[in-house]
Image (cartoon, rainbow, N blue to C red):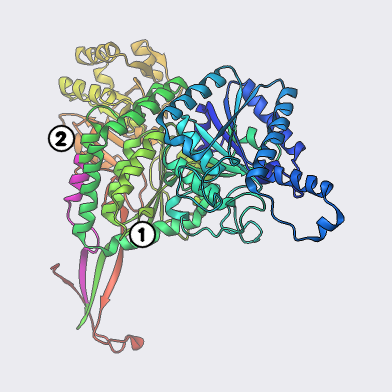
């Protein structure tokens, strides 16, 4: 199922509109075979419990064809030599409606479906009593599994120039269908046309492309429509106008072909056919619609605009985001609750659900961290060093944004907020791909954040990717995207590293160790170990392996520590030495990230043995030693080759906010570029600015190099 069509899983009441071009042939006669195929699909949906409402055109066209034939039969040769007067449209409608409904009733009867006819005019809807009665009648018919069939009663309509006047409540059957979809609270409106959907230009133009998702901000005013329908009133232009109105009012609309076999069934299965109109479509700018390169280039262009505005304006964007998040907290909570509920129903493990949940106070904490980032010193264009190369020739090393970042993350919607804030502060464009389990949370957060980005920068500064299938196209853009930061499972990180030429920043595993040395204060050790494991077991900086000096294995303090861990519900697994000493289950592997209330314990001979164990089985994330021996402490701190090494402090302190970075895009175990928690500085690179007074190299004979370090202004 296409991710933008997932909403169809919850659809029950559907309005289908069939146009004149669908129900009639080129010669004006009714297209019995085509209508029959459509009705077979409607019968199947009806039997599955869908509530089907049909709006049909074609009465005028069908009536005109019959009346022309009847006039021909009843005319003399002399009559035929006279100029032929166009038959009155109202008379055509009266005759055609009779034949149309006779055909419909016959076809539905063959399928054992009961249908019902409701003819309406524009004036009818001016009456509140009519609207109420209409709704009650339709509800009754649907409860009896009858399919109501609507048509505008052109035979008695009093509206002048009905084909041109668009000032009424509705002005054709497309706008009638949209009106009924809203009036009858339909979950979906499907407009069946004689083409596959909305194209970027006339369908006959070979350069025109089918638009899968209509995005008002992108497509409005840019679509070139072809001629009007060969038989209907307004063609595609009328359908789009009706679709936009319905979608903006809350009813999704799909325009698709009524000629293609099984298109109706495909729509209700969520397949990517036709053109979708949805009030949230601006959140679904998928790569299929705009292209991977176009999305990345748009982010880059917006990032350059972001860099060009004054620092105080970038700061204001962040402050506006913080305020908007606080104001929309209830809406965010509702979407997050829906994601969490769906994740639990789907059977996701507790650690993922824990990362997915935005706990009480989280939005306030995020807003606070954004304001902290906003108040940081301007990071862009900072002079990091100044060197006089020669008299009048000064070289400056300055900070600058990386360009475009692609962040692929799982579970944690709060990561989206942190990453967006850091990207804006550092002047980078951003493409985000969150896990499907957080789709609703990510969508509303993205909408809130981009809503406050001014037009001088552009909302495409931050793009959101909705489907995993779109990631490979982005990973090929090493000439446009400057850095990929994956935040998720070992599999996710490894897969990305193996499939792209773009530099990748991050860590695959968080195998964090706490080593309790023989000189440790056991009360301190107990507090640190319990916090490192239990403060947030699903975090990448939570302790996964506890190493203990062999001299402590029988000590009262260590035994009490084991008892407390068990009391708190921690499952203990042991290495070869610990499993037998403490009578606990044998650990299958030392290189295992539990992300839950579980950890591995192993006994080591001394600090060197602990260091060797960490280097062999660790992931280079965060390690801690608990000791009162300063010599041992310094040896551990200098010898352990990890991104973060702590003395007498919980591994949970390895965090961008706790380090004073405001937030983090992730924690890197790489040794190139940024390492450890990555904040604003980790999203910057450098460039050299050389200021001269006309110097040339000339074989280095004309320059007297001084290479003198200059003070920073």
**Residue at 69% in and 46% down:** 61
Residue pointed to by mark 1: 302
> Marks 1 and 2, Cα distance to the nearest angstrom?
51 Å
Residue pointed to by mark 2: 630
SS for tag 1? helix
Q: Quadrant of residue 361?
A: top left
- Classify mark 2: residues with Cα within 10 Å, few (<14), some (14-19) or many (20+): few
Q: Is residue 279 above or below residue 513?
A: below
Q: Is residue 624 visible?
A: no
Q: Is residue 30 above or below residue 314?
A: above
Q: Quadrant of the N terminus?
A: top right
Q: Is residue 635 above or below residue 554?
A: below
Query: Which region is colored magenta?
Result: 368-388
| Front in this rendered view, residue 675 or 192 | 192
Q: Is residue 253 magenta?
A: no
- Please state if 125 lies on the left or on the right of 604 as rendered: right
The image position of residue 166, as x and y in percent, is 48, 50
| Front in this rendered view, residue 264 or 66 | 66
The image position of residue 394, as x and y in percent, is 22, 77
- Please state if 695 lies on the left or on the right of 511 as rendered: left
The image position of residue 555, as x and y in percent, is 22, 14
SS for tag 2? helix
Look at discs 1 and 2 and give the one toward the viewer.
1
């Amino acid at each position: 199922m296409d991710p933008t069509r997932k909403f169809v899983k919850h659809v029950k009441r559907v309005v289908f509109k069939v146009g004149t071009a669908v129900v009639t042939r080129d010669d004006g006669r009714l297209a019995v075979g085509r209508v029959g195929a459509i009705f077979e699909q409607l019968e199947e949906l009806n039997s599955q419990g869908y509530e089907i409402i049909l709006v049909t055109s074609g009465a005028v066209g069908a009536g005109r064809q019959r009346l022309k034939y009847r006039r021909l039969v009843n005319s003399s040769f002399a009559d035929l030599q006279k100029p032929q007067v166009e038959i009155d449209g109202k008379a055509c409608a009266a005759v055609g409606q009779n034949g149309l409904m006779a055909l419909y009733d016959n076809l539905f009867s063959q399928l054992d479906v009961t249908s019902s006819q409701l003819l309406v005019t524009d004036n009818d809807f001016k009456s509140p009593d009519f609207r109420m009665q209409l709704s009650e009648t339709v509800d009754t018919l649907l409860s009896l599994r009858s399919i109501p069939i609507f048509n505008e009663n052109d035979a008695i309509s009093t509206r002048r120039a009905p084909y041109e006047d668009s000032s009424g409540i509705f002005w054709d059957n497309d706008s009638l269908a949209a009106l009924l979809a809203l009036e009858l609270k339909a979950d979906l409106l499907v407009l069946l046309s004689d083409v596959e959907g909305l194209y970027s230009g006339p369908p006959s133009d070979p350069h025109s492309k089918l638009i899968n998702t209509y995005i008002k901000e992108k497509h409005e005013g840019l679509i070139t429509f072809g001629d009007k329908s060969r038989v209907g009133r307004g063609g595609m232009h009328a359908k789009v106008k009706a679709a936009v109105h319905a979608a903006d009012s809350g009813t999704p609309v799909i325009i698709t072909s009524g000629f293609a076999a099984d298109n109706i069934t495909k729509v209700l299965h969520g397949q990517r056919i036709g053109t979708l109109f949805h009030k949230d479509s601006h959140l679904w700018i998928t790569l299929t619609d705009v292209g991977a390169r176009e999305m990345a280039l748009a982010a880059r262009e917006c990032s350059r605009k972001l860099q060009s505005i004054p620092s105080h304006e970038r700061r204001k964007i962040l402050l506006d985001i913080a305020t908007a998040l606080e104001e929309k907290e209830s809406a965010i909570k509702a979407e997050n609750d829906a994601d969490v509920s769906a994740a639990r129903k789907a059977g996701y493990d507790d650690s993922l659900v824990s990362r997915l949940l935005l706990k009480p106070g989280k939005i306030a904490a995020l807003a606070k961290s954004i304001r902290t980032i906003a108040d940081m010193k301007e990071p862009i264009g900072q002079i990091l060093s100044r060197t006089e190369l020669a008299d009048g020739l000064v070289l400056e090393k300055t900070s600058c944004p990386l360009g475009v970042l692609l962040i692929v993350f799982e579970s944690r919607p709060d990561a989206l907020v942190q990453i967006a804030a850091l990207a804006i502060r550092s002047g980078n464009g951003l493409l985000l791909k969150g896990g499907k389990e957080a789709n609703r949370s990510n969508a509303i957060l993205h909408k809130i954040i981009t809503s406050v980005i001014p037009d001088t920068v552009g909302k495409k500064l931050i793009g959101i990717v909705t489907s995993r299938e779109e990631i490979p196209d982005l990973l090929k853009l090493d000439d446009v995207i400057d850095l990929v930061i994956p935040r998720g499972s070992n599999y996710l990180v490894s897969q990305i590293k193996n499939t792209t030429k773009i530099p990748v920043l991050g860590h695959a595993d968080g195998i964090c160790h706490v080593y309790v040395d023989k000189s440790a204060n056991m009360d301190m050790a107990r507090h640190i170990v319990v916090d490192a494991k239990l403060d947030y077991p699903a975090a990448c900086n939570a302790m996964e392996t506890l190493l203990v000096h062999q001299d402590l294995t029988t000590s009262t303090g260590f035994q009490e520590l084991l008892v407390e861990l068990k009391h708190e519900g921690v499952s203990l697994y042991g290495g070869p030495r610990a499993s037998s000493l403490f009578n606990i289950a044998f650990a299958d592997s030392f290189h295992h990230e539990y992300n839950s209330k579980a950890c591995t314990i192993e006994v080591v001979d001394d600090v060197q043995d602990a260091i060797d164990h960490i280097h062999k089985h660790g992931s280079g994330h965060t390690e801690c030693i608990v000791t009162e021996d300063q010599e041992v402490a310094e040896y551990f701190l200098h010898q352990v080759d990890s991104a973060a090494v702590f003395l007498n402090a919980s591994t949970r302190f390895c965090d961008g906010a706790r380090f004073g970075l405001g937030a983090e895009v992730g924690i890197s175990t790489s040794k190139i570029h940024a390492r450890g928690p990555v904040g604003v500085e980790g999203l910057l690179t450098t460039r050299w600015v050389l200021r001269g007074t006309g110097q040339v190299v000339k074989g280095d004979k004309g320059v007297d190099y001084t290479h003198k370090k200059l003070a920073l202004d």
